Amino acid sequence: MVKHAVEANFDGLVGPTHNYAGLSWGNVASKSNVRAESNPKEAALQGLAKMKRLADRGYVQGILPPHERPHIPTLRALGFEGADSQILEQAAKSSPSILAAVSSASTMWTANAATVSPSADTADHRVHFTPANLSAKFHRSIEHRVTGRALKAIFADEGYFAHHPALPSVSQFGDEGAANHTRLCGGYGEPGVELFVYGQVAFNDQAPAPKKYPARQTLEASQAIARLHGLDDQHTVFAQQNPNAIDAGVFHNDVIAVGNGNTLFYHDMAFLEEERVLADIRSRLTGAELEAVRVSSEEVPIEDAVASYLFNSQLLKTPDGMMLAVPGECREVASVSRYLDTLVQSGGPITSVEVFDVKQSMRNGGGPACLRLRVVLSDEELKAMHRGVLLTDDLYERLTAWVKAHYRDRLSQADLADPMLLEEVRKALDELTGILGLGSIYDFQL
Ligand code: SUG
C-alpha cells in the first residue's frame, strides 16, 4: 500500500569555527579562498535564513547540529599530549595544516553526511541511513561517528529506522553520501529509483578515471550502500560521472545535476553514458514519466556551472511544478543568469527560480544543495522521529539568538589555536544539544 510521504530537508547548522583553510583539492572554491578571513556568525545566520524561508513556504525543515571543533580527540590520537590548550599550541606550532583540518566546520554540508533510502524502496520497509566515510579528505573523514550518533538520536525508533556504520575508510570504498545520490519517483510514498553516481571504479585499473583531480566516490561504495539498504535492481541505477567534469572542478555529482520527483536537471557533461543512464531510469520509474531537463555546454559552459553552482540548487516541489532555489552567484554569471530567465518560460517542469544568499558557505564550495540532507518520511515516520530538530518559528528565534550570543564575526587561521575558541565552541554546543533536545552526542559530553 502506498503511504503518504514528504521530503524533509535537514540542513547543517554552520559551526562556530567556519573558516577557509583550502583543505579540498579538486574543489575550486576551497582552493581559491584559502586563508581568507571568514565570518562564522554571518555564515550560520545565512544558513538559518535559508531554512526559515523554506519552512515558511511549508516545507518540512530540520537541523543537523555542527560538530565539536577543533577536535581534540583526533589530535590526541595523532600523538599530541597534555592539556587541551597545550595540544592546541603544539599542533599550531608543528602542524598547522592538521590543526586546520580538525577545526573545519565542514559538517555544515549535510548532503555529505549520509545516504538515506526511504522505506518505500527498501526490502524491510524501514528508512535506512549510512553515514558517509568521506575518506577522500582527512578533515571530513573524522565526521561520520558523530554524524551517526546525531542521526541515531533523531531517528531512534528501530521499528521505522535502520542505521549502518560508515563503510571501511579506505579509498576503494570512498563514499560522499547523498551528494552522489538522487532519488526519482512519482509520489514520495511510491517506490522510487535511486540513482547512485560514482567517480571511479576502484578495482579496475582500465576503467575511465579523472586525470587531474580525485574521484571521491567509488562504484564499489555505491553498490555496498545499495546492498546494505536492501535496494533491488528495480530500484537502483549506477552511473559514472564524466571524468572530464571532475577534472573541471565537479568534485561531487550535485555540482552538476539535481533531481527530485520525476525531474532530473543536469548538464550535458554530468554522466559518462548519458543515454544509458536516462534509459535505465525510464525503464525503472513507475507512476510518472521522467522529465529530463538537460543544459547544454553551449548554453552554460562547464566553468560557468562550477563558478555559479547552478546545479547545486535545491529542486523543490511546489503546487504548480518545481522551484529551483539557486545561490546568489547564479545571477553574477552572465550565461547562467540568461539561462535561468529562459528556463521558467520554457514550459518545462521547473516553474520558478528563487535566489538564496549562502555566500559564506559558497566560498568553500558549498551551495544550497550541499547544505541539506533529504529524508523522505511517511506520516508515521515523521511522527516517530525526534521532532525537536524541526524548525518552527520559536526554534528559529532561539537558534538565531544562540548564534548571536556565541559566534565570532571574524576568524582567521591564527585564531584556530586560541584555547578560548575551543571553550566557546564547547559551551555553545552543550547549550545547543539542550535546545534541540538531543542528549549527549559530542565526545566532550560523553
Ligand atoms: O567537501 N568543502 C567541502 C564542500 C562540500 C560541498 N558538498 C557538496 N557538494 N555536496 C568539500 O570539499 C572546504 C573546507 C576548507 O577548505 O576550509 C570543504 O571541505
Image (tube, rainbow, N blue to C red):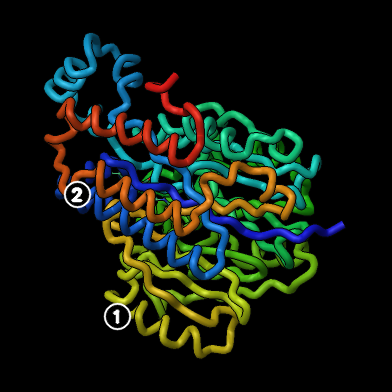
Give the residue number, with chain letter if any, for mark 1.
Answer: 334
Residue drawn at x 56%, y 53% as measured from the top left: 374
- Up the image or down, 105 lies above or below 369; here it is above
> Is residue 170 visible in this depiction of the protein?
no
User: Among all residues in the image, which is located at the extreme front?
Assistant: 394
Q: Which mark is residue 284?
A: none
- Up the image or down, 296 lies above or below 272; here it is below
Q: CA distance from mark 1 to mark 2?
A: 27 Å
Q: Nearer the viewer, mark 1 or mark 2?
A: 2
Give the residue number, with chain letter if any, for mark 2.
Answer: 38
Ranked by sequence position, the earlier of labels 1 and 2 is: 2
Q: Is mark 2 within 8 Å of ligand 1?
A: no
**Kind of residue sitting beneath label 1:** Ala
Percent x, y of residue 93:
12, 22
User: Among all residues in the image, which is located at the extreme right?
Assistant: 1
**Residue 366 falls in which quadrant of the image?**
bottom left
